[in-house]
Image: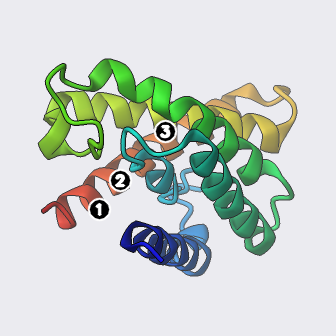
Amino acid sequence: MSTDFMKRAMAFVVFCLVQVLVLNHIHLLGFATPLLYVDFAISFRRNYPKWAILVWCFLLGLVIDIFSNTPGVTAGAMTLLALLQPYLLNPFIPRDSTDDLQPSMRTLGVTKFITFVIICVAIYTLTFFALEAFSFFNWEQWLLTVGGSLVLTVVFVLVVENMFAK
């Protein structure tokens, strides 16, 4: 087996455990929940096969759904993010970069990376909470939940990125 596959599998397990055992129990001010596993989808390198990104993200979403009692919501939102991630990454990549560029603050630059993370997390949180609510009847609460979770998730992703930067 390749080392890349083993690293992905290990990250898969770690993100599942951290989300299910710790982060699902954090509800800041009653509506903001950190969704750190989104970093798994954000971190795929440039030339990673698109079908593999879809499979990895769908499986991660499915496992999170099973343990979080959100039937299909996480899997659907993660699959959408996996579908869009390669196309969202392209505008931020420098022209003279290698084909196997890993998105990070070091490779993209701080501003570009933060913008990329905010866009990816915004797409994910909008999709996730729209599927979860399946109604815009209480749109104020929905906006608070999306906004709070967006900010909290971006902060967590940036903290994790700084902790594990090479």
Q: Where is residue 68 in the image (x, y as percent from the top left)?
A: 74, 69
Q: Can residue 144 be seen in this view?
A: no
The residue tagged 1 is 160
| Earlier-in-chain disc, 1 versus 3 | 3
Above or below: residue 96 compared with residue 19: above
Instruction: Say which of 16 and 85 sits in front.
Output: 85
Q: Report how far apart the C-alphas of labels 1 and 3 lie in the structure.
A: 14 Å
The image quadrant that residue 131 belongs to is: top right
The outermost residue toward the front is 1
Helix, strand or loop at mark 2 = helix
Q: Report how far apart the C-alphas of labels 2 and 3 lie in the structure.
A: 9 Å
The residue tagged 3 is 121
Q: Could you classify mark 3 by the number of other residues whose Cα lies within 10 Å: few (under 14), some (14-19), or many (20 or more)? A: many
Above or below: residue 18 compared with residue 90: below
Dot 2 and dot 3 residues touching (CB under 8 Å): yes
| Earlier-in-chain disc, 2 versus 3 | 3
The residue tagged 2 is 157
Q: Report how far apart the C-alphas of labels 2 and 1 lie in the structure.
A: 5 Å
